[in-house]
Amino acid sequence: MTRLLMVAALLAACAGRAAPAGHGPAIRLRLPSLDGGEIDTASYRGRVVVLHLFTTASTASQLDFEQLADLDQKEPRRAVVIGIMVDRVASTIARAWQRGMGARYLVATADDGLRRGAGPLGVVKTVPTTVVLDGAGRTVHRVERPLERGELRRLVAPLLGAPR
């Protein structure tokens, strides 16, 4: 019984935290960009890539915006932020959202495979979900909830190393 209580306490302590996903194979996503082009995560090898899966209607998703914009602005040579809309909104609505939020980072729309969980990210159970890839494109962190204050910086800082 004591062992069961210890396990329950440990699980409760870890609930809601960002869990390191480990270093598996490199992830490559090719998704349509809101500007009409294509975003290919492989083109950002050597940089930390932050994938933020969200919906335009999710208030929880919008809570992460400030941290995403801050990283994008302060680390343009060492990190790239890619917002991925998983809802099915018309491109005009999506662009209006991007303008209204003032999002300067890259924004892509999820394809049907990603929405179904068939892509390299697997099933996205909740929005927002933030996935941090290292310079080799491997998943290092996956956070399936809104980010806590300052959390993105704490997750990314060890991957960025010393400022150049």
Image (spheres, helix red, strand yellow):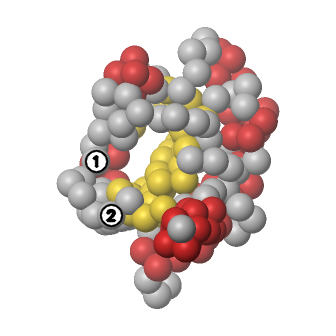
Say which residue label 2 marks: 22
Residue 152 visible in rendering: no
Note whether 49 is above or below 31 in the view shown: below
> In the image, which is nearer the foreground, mark 2 or mark 1?
2
Quarter of the figure that contains the C terminus: bottom left
Near mark 1 (Cα within 10 A), the count class, few <14, some 14-19 or many ≥20, is some
Residue 3 pos. (x, y %)? 49, 72
The residue located at (30%, 57%) in the rendering is 137
Residue 50 pos. (x, y %)? 49, 54
Q: Secondary structure at mark 1?
A: loop
Residue 66 visible in rendering: yes
**The residue positioned farthest toward the bottom in the image shown:** 162
Q: Examine the image and state in which quarter residue 67 appears.
A: bottom right
Q: Earlier in the sequence, mark 2 or mark 1?
A: 2
Quarter of the figure that contains the N terminus: bottom right
Q: Amino acid at mark 1?
A: Ile
**The residue positioned farthest toward the left in the image shown:** 25
Q: Is residue 58 left or right of residue 122?
A: right
Q: Amino acid at mark 2?
A: Gly
Say which residue label 1 marks: 27
The residue located at (41%, 33%) in the rendering is 123
Residue 60 pos. (x, y %)? 74, 41
Q: Secondary structure at mark 2?
A: loop
The residue located at (70%, 69%) in the rendering is 150
The residue located at (47%, 79%) in the rendering is 158
| Residue 3 or residue 8, whichever sits in front | 3
- What's the distance in space between the residues labelled 2 and 1, CA to CA? 13 Å
Q: Examine the image and state in which quarter residue 74 appears.
A: bottom right
How many discs appear? Answer: 2
